[in-house]
Amino acid sequence: MKTFIELNDITFYAYHGVMPQENIVGNNFEVNIKIGIDYTKAIENDDLDGTINYAEIYDIIKKEMDIPSKLLEHIAGRIINSLISKWNAIYFINIKLSKCKPPIDGDVKKASVIIEWNK
């Protein structure tokens, strides 16, 4: 059995971007993440110790989103590294990090990066 935890449409206002103005004005960002971890013990025992508390996942994502960066790729990579360093049992992560209304000469709703990590 494969088991996953997902957090969807997590929104942040943060100061990421290559352009200097982006670091001053900020922008809205969205994170979607899927984490593979065996939580069959939680299924059987109804005990939080058999899984990952999704509030702790959120806290890690928020911590990394609070650090200004130029590239979405860098932020997503830091989030993955923080999660796998805290929970060795994670075997899969798929993260999509999006910048809403990016500073592009055109009508673009979001610019996104997606990273899929496997143990």
Image (spheres, rainbow, N blue to C red):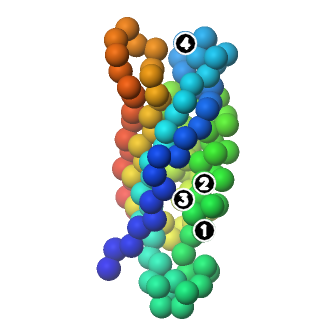
Q: CA distance from mark 3 to mark 1?
A: 14 Å
Instruction: Give, as a three-letter code, the residue at label 4.
Output: Met
Q: Residue at x 34, y 16 (%)?
A: 107
Q: CA distance from mark 4 to mark 1?
A: 36 Å
Q: Nearer the viewer, mark 2 or mark 4?
A: 2
Q: Which image quarter is the N terminus in? A: bottom left
Q: In this rendering, is residue 98 above or below 92?
A: above
- Characterize the local packing of mark 1: few (<14), some (14-19) or many (20 or more) Cα atoms within 10 angstroms: few
Where, by quadrant of the figure, is residue 104 drawn? top left
Q: Which mark is residue 53?
A: 1
Q: Residue at x 44, y 76 (%)?
A: 38
Question: According to the image, label 3 marks what residue?
Answer: 84
Q: CA distance from mark 2 to mark 4?
A: 27 Å
Instruction: Give, as a three-letter code, the residue at label 3.
Output: Ile
Q: CA distance from mark 1 to mark 2?
A: 9 Å
Mark earlier in primary sequence (4, 3): 4
Q: Report if residue 93 is visible in the image.
A: no
Q: Secondary structure at mark 1?
A: loop
Question: According to the image, label 4 marks what residue?
Answer: 19
Question: According to the image, label 2 marks what residue?
Answer: 58
Where, by quadrant of the figure, is residue 64 drawn? top right
